[in-house]
Amino acid sequence: MKPSETVKSISYLKANASEIIRDIINTHKTLIITQNGEAKAILQDIKKYEPIRGRTKTPTNI
């Protein structure tokens, strides 16, 4: 996947949230969200996230 397809600004996310969520659900891709040109967060399909979360040890799931 091209970086231009996986990195979007927070203003783009605000303007296109429904379309982005629908695309992430259908493609299972992870989207990197930038703020002021810096990567700040990711947006990921829950089915991709759950296995990762299950492998990590945190105070809430130890």
Image (cartoon, rainbow, N blue to C red):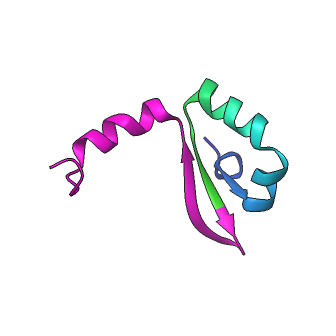
Q: Which residue lies furthest to the top in this view?
A: 26
What's drawn in magenta, residue-wise?
34-62
| Residue 7 placement, left or right of 17 | left
State which quadrant residue 17 falls in.
Answer: top right
Q: Residue at x 24, y 52 (%)?
A: 60
Q: Does the magenta stretch include residue 31?
A: no
State which quadrant residue 1 falls in.
Answer: top right
Q: Which residue is drawn at 63% across and 24% down?
A: 26
| Residue 4 placement, left or right of 48 | right
Residue 24 at x, y percent in the picture: 62, 34
Q: Which residue is drawn at 79% across and 53% down?
A: 14
Q: Does the magenta stretch include residue 52?
A: yes
Q: Residue furthest left?
A: 62
Residue 36 at x, y percent in the picture: 72, 75
Residue 28 at x, y percent in the picture: 55, 31
Residue 5 at x, y percent in the picture: 70, 45
Q: Residue at x 66, y 64 (%)?
A: 34
Q: Residue furthest right?
A: 15
Q: Which residue lies furthest to the front in this view?
A: 60
| Residue 23 placement, left or right of 59 | right
Q: Which of 14 and 42 is in front in this view?
A: 14
